[in-house]
Structure formats: structure tokens, C-alpha cells
Amino acid sequence: MEFIIVDDSVFDLFTQEKLLLKSGLTETVRTFNSPQQAIEHLSSQGAEIPETVILLDLQMPGINGFEFTEHYGLLPEAVRKRIRLFMISSTVDISDIEQAESNPYIIQLLSKPLEIPLLRELLDQ
């Protein structure tokens, strides 16, 4: 299983990547500090994309996490069905939480810092 982290914070990219690699959940983590680059990467993948988990930051300049999901929704279904998308944020804004919960592409909104035991449990479902 491959992980993709999309976050504009270099610190968060670094710490989440190290946490994931140390956890044993994956040996492959791709990081993108630009949502546009992540969408371009996903667009270049075909149905042969490995099973992938995306950890998507909510608040980013340019394209925020919710706008990212709009672009994500345009990807071929053959690509999307190989991906599990989680939003990750430190937000306490109720409207953000409700919007994440109602988004058809987001499995769950996870809190920063990333809790590996919770992520592991969600992935086992």
C-alpha cells in the first residue's frame, strides 16, 4: 500500500512521513506540498495505480482540501476505486467538520497530529 500526503506544511509532511514509515503501515510515502502537483500525479496514473491512501490537509493556499476533492472527483473511477482518501486537519470549525463528513470522497476527517493506531483501525475496516 502506498501513501500520499498532501500538505503545504513542510514540517507536517516530514513528521507524517516519518510516522507512517516507522509504523510499518507502508514502505512508500509520496509527499506533495502542492495540491496541484498531487492531482497531476494522480491524473498520470491509470487503473494500475497501487492501492493508495491519501492524507489530505484541509487548509492550503491556492487549492484547499475541499477544492482538491472536486478535482479528485474528475479522475477516472478505475483510479478512484484504488484510493482511500482521508482529510487531516487541526480545525475545530464545525462547518469544516460537517463539510468533510458530507463529502462523498472523504472517508474521515482525522485530527493533527496523525494518530497511527486510529489510522490502522480505519484501514482494517
Image: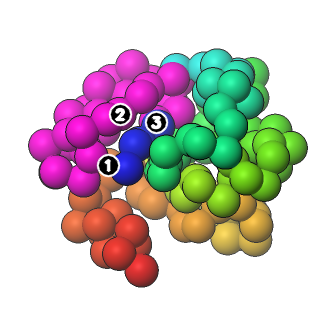
The secondary element bearing badge 3 is classed as strand
Write down the region rendered in magenta: 5-32
Q: How many marks?
A: 3
Q: Determine the image quadrant of residue 62.
A: top right
Whole-angstrom CA distance, mark 1 to mark 3, is: 13 Å
Disc 1 marks a residue whose amino acid type is: Pro
Decide if residue 68 is on the left or right side of residue 20: right
First reached walking from the N terminus: tag 2 or tag 1: 2
The reply to whether residue 69 is visible in this rendering is: no
Q: Return the disc, 1 or 3, that comes first in the chain's sequence.
A: 3
Q: Which mark is residue 5?
A: 3
Picture residue at 27% right of the left edge, 46% below the top = 26
Image coordinates of residue 68 in percent, x first then y, are 74, 39
Mark toward the viewer: 2 or 1: 2
Residue 31 location (% of width, % of height)? 44, 26
Say if 82 sits above or below 5 in the image. Answer: below
Label 3: few (<14), some or many (≥20) within 10 Å?
Answer: many
Judging by the rendered image, the residue that carries numbered circle 2 is 29
Q: Which residue is mark 1?
A: 113
User: How many C-alpha atoms fall within 10 Å of the one at disc 2: few (<14), some, or many (≥20)?
Assistant: many
Q: Is residue 60 magenta?
A: no
Asked if labels 1 and 2 touch by Cβ distance under 8 angstroms, the answer is: no
Q: Position of residue 50 (x, y in %)?
A: 49, 45
Q: Quadrant of residue 111?
A: bottom left
* Left or right, residue 116 beside residue 50: left
Under mark 2, the amino acid is Val
Element under label 1?
Answer: loop
Q: CA distance from mark 2 to mark 1?
A: 17 Å
Name which of mark 2 and mark 3 comes first in the sequence: 3
Disc 2 + disc 3, Cβ < 8 Å = yes
